[in-house]
Structure formats: structure tokens, C-alpha cells
Image (cartoon, grey):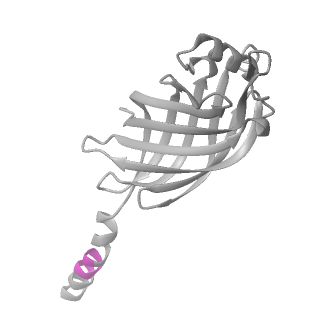
Amino acid sequence: MKTQYRILVITILLLLPLLTTAQKVVSFQQAAANKTTVAGTSTLHDWTMTSTEAVYDAKFELSNEGAPVQLISLTYSLPAESLKSGKGAMDKNAYNALNTDKHKKITFVLTNSMAEGNNLKCNGNLTIAGVTKPITLEASCKAGANGDLSCTAKYALKMTDFKVEPPTFMFGSIKTGDDLTLTFSINLTPVKL
């Protein structure tokens, strides 16, 4: 009997570290504060368009301390006409270039990711103006004290990669550059079940 008891105690002691480092999968949705920025250039000046209307759904594997270990799934959807520059004529030209009458949303769907500390390498499909391209973007996510996650990501692209013709203004005298930078600042909160 004593031998069986010793074996049981040793087994529990060996398994205890595995039990205490178990990870959990948690679903997240965006909190009130999130921001998408599109930045570009023109022959006149640099410009930005911003939206706070993106919708995110994500599933992370978290450590017991709440730190992100792996991004399992992510969907992002942005109403294209929610992007605003503060200049109505510029917004109108951008919406025409994006063909927002036909393509209402800009989306990203994760296909896989790799995590190293707080940094994530995210592979997925980005759709702009109805054209979908596989992309890889780098993201950083940090856990907050209340279980929320704060994430940032940046991605450089060319409009023409998505068959978007860079807009021109004033009969072509002002031309928009082809290069854009998308910046995402996201606050995610756990979904309460």
C-alpha cells in the first residue's frame, strides 16, 4: 500500500507543473476604442484617412497570466466609407477609387499565425475594392490588468496591387501616390459567456 501511495504522490508532483501551465482559449471582440488609419502621399502633401468603425472578432490562446500565446482566429471588417480625411472632396475621390458603391467593406481574415512573446506574425486574406490578396502583417499584443488585450499592427501596400487606381485631383494636376500604410490600433475585450 505504501508503494502505491508513493507512486501516486510522485505522479501528482510530476504532473503539477503541467497542470499549472495549462493554457486557455478565449474569444474576444473589439472594445469601444479601436482605430484604423490609412496614410499616403500625393504631389501636394501627405494625407491620412481614419475610421473607428471596424468590427473585430478574435480567438486567442492565453497563458494563465492572460498573456497571448497564439492567435487562433481573427476577422476584421471595416465599412469603406467610414474612412474620413476631414476633406469631403478627398473622401469622395477615395470612395470612387475604392468603388464603394459595389464594395462596401474592407476585410481581413486570418489563415494562420505564429507568436513569439508579444509579437504575432499574421497570415491572412486582405480584401480591398473586391480584390483579395494573401498578406503577412506583424502585430504586437499586450494583456491588460482586466483581461483586455491591446494590439497594434502596420502593413504597407500598393493600391494597384488591389486594382485600385490612385486618385487624381484638379484635372490630374495633383496625383496620389501608389504606396499606402495601414495602421491598426485595437482594444479587445473577452466575450462574456
Which segment did they paint magenta? 8-13
**Position of residue 97 measured from the top left corner of the image (x, y, whole percent):** 75, 22
Q: Quadrant of residue 76?
A: top right
Q: Is residue 85 above or below residue 11?
A: above
Q: Quadrant of the N terminus?
A: bottom left
- Residue extending furthest left? 2
Q: Main secondary structure of the magenta part?
A: helix
Q: Is residue 77 above or below residue 122?
A: above
Q: Is residue 11 above or below residue 60?
A: below
Q: Which one is in front, 26 or 138?
A: 138
The residue lying at 46 percent from left, 30 percent from top is 35
The residue lying at 37 percent from left, 37 percent from top is 190
The residue lying at 65 percent from left, 23 percent from top is 105
Within the magenta stretch, is there residue 14? no
The residue lying at 60 percent from left, 45 percent from top is 155
**Position of residue 110 measured from the top left corner of the image (x, y, whole percent):** 61, 44
**Position of residue 102 measured from the top left corner of the image (x, y, whole percent):** 76, 16
Q: Is residue 56 above or below residue 66?
A: above
